[in-house]
Amino acid sequence: MSYYQAMEAAGANVLAFQSFGSYQGDWWAKVEFNDITFFVSGSYGSCSGCDAFEGEFGWENGRCSDHEYDEAGSVGCPECAERGITFQKRLSDFGLAYLTNPWTQEEAIKEASRNLDWDSDAQEMVDWLKAA
C-alpha cells in the first residue's frame, strides 16, 4: 500500500507518481480527479516514524490476523470481509486528504524550486514536474 494507492482508492486516476530522496522524503503526483488534471504533493518523512501513511496503516492490509499473509485464504472469511471494507474506507479518506490542495504544473514547479539552493534532490523534482 502507498500514497499512490490511497489516492486511487479515493477515486483519482494517478497519471504519474514519483518519490524523491529529498530532505523530507517528498513525493509528487499528477492526478486526474473530478475531471480535472492537477499536481499534488506530500512527504513520507525522513524516517519511518515521520511517514503519515506508515503511521496510519503500518503493515495493515485489511485482512484478519489468521489471513494477514494469506490473501487466497481470506476469500470467504467474514472477518476479512469486514476488515477489508473498513480498511478501504480509511484508505480512501486518507487519499482524499491529498486531493484537496490541487496545484497547476507552474505552481508545483515553483513549490518544488523553493529549496534549490540547498537541497540536492530539489532539481530532480523540478525536472520531473516539467516533464510530467
Image (cartoon, helix red, strand yellow):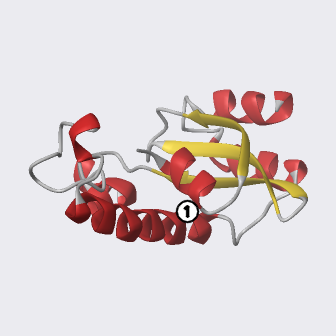
Position in image of residue 18 (x %, y %): 60, 34
- Residue 41: give x, y in percent of width and height: 63, 53
Is residue 97 or residue 25 the one in the foreground? 97
On the image, the x and y values in percent for residue 113 come to 72, 44
> Quadrant of the image for the C terminus?
top right
In the image, 37 versus 76, the foreground residue is 76
Badge 1 element: helix
Q: Is residue 65 left or right of residue 102?
A: left
Q: Residue furthest front?
A: 76
Left or right, residue 94 beside residue 74: right
Which of the 4 image quadrants contains residue 119?
top right
Q: Along the horizontal axis of the image, is 96 left or right of 34?
A: left
Name the residue nearer the viewer: 91 or 43: 91
Give the answer, above or below, for where 14 lies relative to 86.
Answer: above
Q: Which residue is mark 1?
A: 95
Q: Residue at x 76, y 28 (%)?
A: 127
Going by the numbered disc 1, the residue's amino acid type is Gly
Q: Residue furthest left?
A: 66
Height in image: 29 above or below 42? above
**Rendering coords of residue 20 (x, y %):** 53, 33
Could you tell me which residue is drawn at 40 percent across and 67 percent down? Answer: 85
Q: The N terminus lies in which quarter of the figure?
A: top left
Q: Residue at image x 68%, y 60%? A: 11
Q: Quadrant of residue 42?
A: bottom right
Q: Tell me the quarter of the picture where residue 30 sits.
A: top right
Decide which of 29, 116 is in the foreground and name it.
29
Residue 63's place in the image compared with 25, above or below, is: below
Q: At 74% from the left edge and 35% from the top edge, which residue is drawn?
A: 126
